[in-house]
């Protein structure tokens, strides 16, 4: 896959909220949080720039509220606030790991975080800080995957890294299908055609329009992010415009 290597000096890392819960399945597992922060700082120490968008499934998903009878807008707003909890926790962990981070929120929240803007995000990155972009897009009806793509484009990132529980994109769920086959490289159009569910259609369409490479990888294995950033893209799956 050498022909698919490209500069990765500025990346956006998309982490699900569930990833921070670990085996606890709810809230934030301190050991997982510290490991994730350590992975981020190890890449930061190489002089690379990292922005992060986090989900909130470890606390609250907008879909959960809707299923319980809540209004979709109110439910999504709760989910946005939950991402802020994750961002604040990660900022603290990054600090303890020897790095610096800044929480930038898409919704106004006073002394807790600065209001997000592309200019502030790029300023934080250029200053050697991790830009923790919280509260999704700031609007209901959009997933944090879409927020991740949007922020990556606004911050002029070289790629988006999507951390999952498996080591890439498969033709079917590898957890329940032992014969599932992993893709080393796959296009945006193939993702949609095969209905693989790696991320929602809005996110895939936005990534295609912006020609943003996406690397899906397993952050549960220590050191994988560092290795992928340094060229071992085959450890995950690269999603791009053409093979």
Image (cartoon, rainbow, N blue to C red):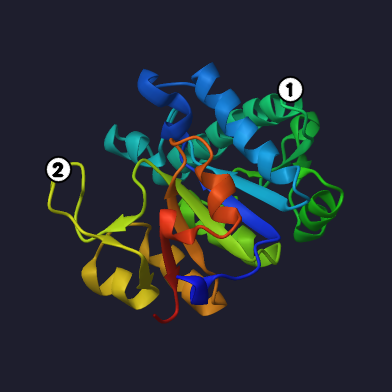
Q: Position of residue 4 (x, y in %)?
A: 50, 73
Q: Residues within 10 Å of mark 1 (few under 14, many from 20)?
A: few
Q: Residue under label 2, please give it.
A: 176
User: Which disc, if any, is residue 88?
Assistant: none
Task: Give how far apart the Cα atoms at labels 2 and 1 are.
Answer: 38 Å
Q: How many circles with numbers are drawn on the protein? A: 2
Give the structural element (helix, strand or loop) at label 1: helix
Of 229 and 88, nearer the camera is: 229
Q: Position of residue 177 (x, y in %)?
A: 13, 47
Which of 151 and 164 lies nearest the eye of the viewer? 164
Q: Position of residue 76 (x, y in %)?
A: 47, 42
Q: Is residue 37 visible?
A: yes
Give the residue at x 75% y 30%: 112
Relative to 190, residue 119 above or below: above
Q: What residue sits 49% from the left and 41% below the top?
A: 55
* Figure quadrant of the C terminus: bottom left
13 vs 128, left or right, is left
Q: Nearer the viewer, residue 232 or 59?
A: 232
Q: Which residue is mark 1?
A: 96
Q: Is residue 147 visible?
A: no
Element at badge 2? loop
Q: Is residue 54 left or right of residue 112?
A: left
Q: Position of residue 26 (x, y in %)?
A: 40, 21
Please give the name of the residue rendered at 53% of the width and 48% of the height, measured from the top-left corner.
Answer: 14
């Amino acid at each position: 896959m050498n022909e698919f290597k490209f500069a990765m000096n500025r990346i956006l890392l998309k982490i699900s909220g569930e990833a921070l819960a670990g085996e606890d399945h709810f809230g934030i597992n301190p050991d997982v949080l510290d490991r994730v922060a350590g992975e981020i700082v190890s890449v930061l120490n190489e002089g690379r720039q990292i922005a992060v968008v986090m989900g909130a499934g470890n606390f609250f998903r907008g879909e959960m509220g809707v299923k319980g009878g809540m209004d979709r807008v109110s439910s999504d707003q709760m989910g946005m606030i939950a991402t802020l909890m994750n961002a604040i926790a990660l900022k603290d962990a990054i600090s303890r790991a020897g790095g610096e981070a800044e929480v930038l929120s898409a919704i106004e929240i006073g002394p807790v975080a600065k209001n997000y803007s592309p200019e502030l995000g790029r300023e934080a990155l250029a200053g050697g800080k991790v830009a923790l972009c919280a509260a999704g897009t700031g609007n209901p009806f959009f997933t944090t995957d879409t927020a991740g793509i949007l922020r990556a484009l606004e911050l002029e990132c070289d790629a988006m890294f999507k951390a999952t529980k498996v080591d890439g994109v498969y033709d079917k769920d590898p957890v329940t299908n032992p014969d599932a086959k992993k893709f080393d490289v796959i296009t945006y159009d193939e993702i949609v055609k095969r209905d693989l569910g790696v991320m929602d259609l809005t996110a895939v369409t936005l990534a295609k329009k912006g020609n943003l490479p996406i690397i899906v990888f397993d952050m549960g294995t220590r050191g994988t992010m560092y290795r992928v950033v340094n060229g071992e893209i085959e450890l995950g799956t690269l999603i791009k415009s053409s093979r």
